[in-house]
Amino acid sequence: MMGMSTPYELTGRTSQKARTRNALVAAARELMAEGINPTVEQAADRADISRTTSYRYFPNQRALLLATYPELEAPTLLEADASNDPVERVAAVAGHYTAQVLEYEHELCAQLRLSLEPSVEGQDLHLRKGRAIGWYEDALAPLRDRMPAAEVHRVALAIRAATGIEAFVWLTGIAGLSREEAGEIMRFSARAIAESAATGAERR
């Protein structure tokens, strides 16, 4: 199609280019862990890659920060033999999800900052794709025969709001909790919301 260009790393010597791109992303993540919001130049210097070359992969800081987001594409966070109890299912998903938040804190915080900036065409933010909402809806599946789909979705939204990077930042930065305490509170909130929803469904 006219007007469509092929990304630099997908043209010629793709294996070498993939290694270069990965090195830049790894460098950016290292800088994030040090409390730095890395520019392309800083990532290039850390990775010992020329700045000119680095800009071929990431034309600006936003593109670099977007690339640091971890690939969390799993359709479900539940095991194949997961319980049919919605509360236990939500607790299991919340355990996995909050562990991801703690593990990828710096990358997720970068995505959160980007989400507060004006949208850029062609650069979709991962935080806006609602993967975690789908995971929680999957956990709440046993309630679907007792609760309208819209309400199941509403419960999933409530749990996501209590367990995502936004809640983590508030708990650690405003409430002053440790990272581990914040994770515990998020898991507690997820279970409490699920228990309330399950109890309400039983009374219908």
Image (spheres, grey):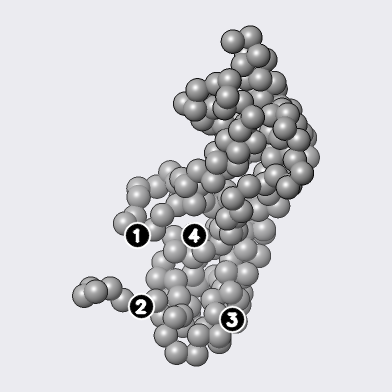
Give the residue at mark 4: 66
Give the residue at mark 3: 19
Q: Mark 2: which secondary structure?
A: loop
Residue at the image position 31 percent from the left and 76 percent from the top: 5
Give whichever of 194, 141 is nearer the camera. Answer: 141
Vertical position of residue 175 compared to residue 113: above or below = above
Q: Is residue 178 left or right of residue 201?
A: right
Q: CA distance from mark 3 to mark 1?
A: 24 Å
Q: Residues within 10 Å of mark 3 (few under 14, many from 20)?
A: few
Q: Mark 3: which secondary structure?
A: helix
Q: CA distance from mark 4 to mark 1?
A: 12 Å
- Mark before the other along the chain sequence, 4 or 2: 2
Give whichever of 155, 149 is nearer the camera. Answer: 149
Residue 1 visible to an observer of this rendering: yes
Image-quadrant location for residue 85? top right
List the single residue furthest toward the left: 2
List the single residue furthest toward the top: 203
Residue at the image position 57 percent from the left and 27 percent from the top: 144
